[in-house]
Amino acid sequence: MADVALHAGVALGTVSNVLNKPEKVKELTRRKVMASIAELGFVRNDAARSLAAGTSNTIGIVLADLSNSLFVDIARGAEATVRQHGMNLLIANSDVDLTKQSLNISLFEQSRVAGVLLAPLDTAFARTNSVLSTTPLVLVNYASESGTYSGVVADEVHGGYEAARHLIGLGRTRLVFLGGPLMLMAVAQRLAGARAAVAESPGVTLEHIETRGLNMAHGRQAGQEILTRPAGTFDGAVAASDLLAVGAIQVLDENAGYEVPTDLAFIGYDDNHFASESAIPVSTISQHGEEMGRAAAQLLINEIHGGPLTLKRTVVIKPDLVPRRSTLGDDWRRD
Amino acid sequence: MADVALHAGVALGTVSNVLNKPEKVKELTRRKVMASIAELGFVRNDAARSLAAGTSNTIGIVLADLSNSLFVDIARGAEATVRQHGMNLLIANSDVDLTKQSLNISLFEQSRVAGVLLAPLDTAFARTNSVLSTTPLVLVNYASESGTYSGVVADEVHGGYEAARHLIGLGRTRLVFLGGPLMLMAVAQRLAGARAAVAESPGVTLEHIETRGLNMAHGRQAGQEILTRPAGTFDGAVAASDLLAVGAIQVLDENAGYEVPTDLAFIGYDDNHFASESAIPVSTISQHGEEMGRAAAQLLINEIHGGPLTLKRTVVIKPDLVPRRSTLGDDWRRD
DNA sequence: TTGAAAGCGCTAACAC
DNA sequence: GTGTTAGCGCTTTCAA
C-alpha cells in the first residue's frame, strides 16, 4: 500500500481512504490512486485489513450436505443478501459429518469472519461444543431450542398439513404417510401436520409406514411394503421426501396394479431439483430454500450491526404446495 | 494470547509454539497451556496469524455451479486431500456467472489463501482478467491452453469413445449423438470421441442431433426430434449429458414405439447422482469428480510448497463406463 | 484533505 | 527448552 501511495504521490492514509471511504477523497485523487493500484497490480491484504479493523466483511456458511439441493438453495439465497450488503459468502461443507461441522465452525471463528450461518443436520446440532464466544451465529433449518441463537426454519407441520390437505381435496380418503426415522424432527413434524389435516376431515384415515431413511432406496422398500397390502388399501400417499416418493412410485410403476395417480396419488417433500423431472413429475412441498437463506443472512447481518444484545428471533417460513402430475394426473401441464 | 500466557504462567512465545510447533515444547507445559486455552475460551486469530506468518493454511475453491453434482464431487475430493495436509477448504459458488467467478477469485486472493482451485464453466474461463500475481492457481475440469497453470481434466474424447464403443459392442449400428452447443468444448470432444469409435467400426453410422443445451428440457426436444424420424432410424444413442438422456428417454417412453433399450439403447454422460435413479437407470460415463478434485488439490499443494517455478502440468483423468439398464436392459441388476 | 504514528494479534528469529 | 522483540500490512486517530 505504501508503494501505491508513493506511485500516486499521496499519503498512505489516503490510499486507505480511497479503498474504504471513497467519499472522503477528492474525485481526482481517487482516480489517480485507482490508476496506480491497477498499474501496480496491488491487491489489498484482507488479513491485515481485518486484523487492523477488527472486523471482516465475509460471512461463512456451514452446510450440512452439499448434495442436498435444499442446502445449495439456502446458500444461494444467503449469498444474494450478503452481496447486497457488500459482503462476501464463503461456504464450508460438513458432508453429513458432525465432526467436520464443528471443525468448520471453528475454522470460520478463527478466520474472524463477521458472522456464521449454520445449516446443521436435522438432529446433529445437539449441543455443538463449539461455543461461539463472539462470532454472531444464525441457524438455518434448525431451531435453537434455548433461544440462544436466531434462526430460520420451515414450518414442517404446516407442510405436512398442506400435503395431506391437497390429497384430501382431491377426494382421497385412505392415506398413507411414508417416512422415517421419526428421530428426525422434520419427519415427525411433517407427519404431525398430515395427521392434523386428517383429524379435521371425517372419513379420512392415515396410516404410517416408517422408513429407515429418506432416500430413493428407502422409497423402494416402502413401495414394496405398499404392494404387500390388498389393492386399494391406500389411495393417497404423503412421502417425507421427494426421493422417497420417486422410489416408491418406481416400484409401484413396475408392478402393474397401482397406477399413479389414478389408483394412488403421491406427494413428496423438498422440491428436490429432480422431483419435477422424474418420469412422473412429483407433486411436492417446497421449502423455499433461497428465501430461507435470504432471511437467515438478513438476521445475521442485523446481529452483526446490532451487537451481541440484538434480540434473538426465529423466522418461520411457510412451505408451499407445488402440484404436479403425481397427484393431478394428466390435468397437470408440463411447462 | 498474552492472557493465555499469563494464565498458564509461561511466555507468550511458548503459547505460540504450543499451537504451531508442539514438538518444541515440554509435554507438561503443553498441557498447562492447552488447559488455559480451553479455560479462557481462547481462539487463535487467523488473520493475525497469516499476516505474521505470511502464509495461510486454507485453500479456496471457486466452483462454476453448485447445482451440478460434478462440481460438488470435485469439491469433496479436493477437501479430502487438503485436509490430509492439515489445511482447510473454503468454497465459493460462481453460480454460472462469469462476473461472480472473477469476484470469487479475487476474494480469495485478497484473503491471502495459500492457493486457489478454479473449476470454471466450460467456455467461461476465457482469459479471466484477474491475473493471480502470487497466489498459486490450479484449474479443474478445464485445460489452461497456454500452459500457464497446472490443471486436471477429464479425457472427454476418451469418454465419448467409450460410450460409443459400448453401444457398438452391444451390436448397435445406427447411432445418434445428442448434444450441444458445440461451442462447449466438452461436448465437441465427446462427439469427436464417439466419431472415432464409429470410424473404426465398419458398418456403423453416427448422426448428430445438436441440442441447444444439456438439460432435461433439451433432452425432451431431442426426443421429439427422434420421433420425427422413421421408426428404427436409430438403435443406439449417446447423449452428451445424463439429463439429456433422461429427458429424451421420457419422451420416447411416453410415445410407445421406441422401447429403451430394446429398440434404442441410451447412454448418458456425467454420472449425475440421479442418473442411476431415474425410471430407467441410465448407463453413463463417470468422470470421477472426486478423483479430479483430489488430483487438483495435490497439484496445488505441490505448487504451494514448490514455489512459483514449480513445473506446470496437466493431469488427465480417464472417465469410465458405468453400464446400467438403459443399455443392458433387464440383464442389469439393481443393487 | 494530508502526513505521521500507534497499534490490531500473532510468528519467528534471537539471545538466554 | 524459554523469554524478548521486531515486524507482517493495514486502519485509524490526531494534528497540521
Image: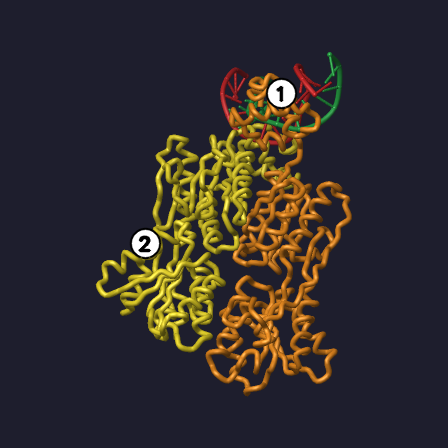
Chain colours: A yellow, B orange, C green, D red
Q: Residue at x 58, y 23 (%)?
A: B1
Residues beneath discs 1 and 2 located on the same chain: no
Picture quarter with the N terminus of chain A: top right
Q: Position of residue A7 (x, y in %)?
A: 65, 33
In the rendered view, tell whether residue B123 sits above or below residue A49. below
Q: Residue at x 70, y 28 (%)?
A: B23
| Tag 1 subunit | B
Is mark 1 in CB contact (under 8 Å) with mark 2?
A: no
Of the pair A28 and A277, the residue shown nearer to us: A277
Q: Is residue A107 left or right of residue A176?
A: right
Of the pair A261 and C15, the residue shown nearer to us: A261
| In this rendering, the label closer to the viewer, 1 or 2 | 2
Amino acid type, callout 1? Leu
Inter-mark Cα distance, 1 to 2: 56 Å
Q: Position of residue B195 (x, y in %)?
A: 69, 75
Of the pair A269 and A257, the residue shown nearer to us: A257
In the rendered view, tell whether residue B15 sits above or below residue B274. above
In the rendered view, tell whether residue B144 sits above or below residue A11. below
Of all residues shown, which one is farthest toward the left?
Answer: A202
Q: Residue at x 62, y 66 (%)?
A: B183
**Is residue B179 visible to us here?**
no
Locate residue A242: give its quadrant.
Answer: bottom left
Which residue in the protein does label 1 denote?
Answer: B12
Amino acid type, callout 2? Ala
**Is residue A287 visible to us here?**
yes
Of all residues shown, which one is farthest toward the bottom?
Answer: B230
Q: Position of residue A152 (x, y in %)?
A: 39, 45
Which residue in the protein does label 2 denote?
Answer: A192
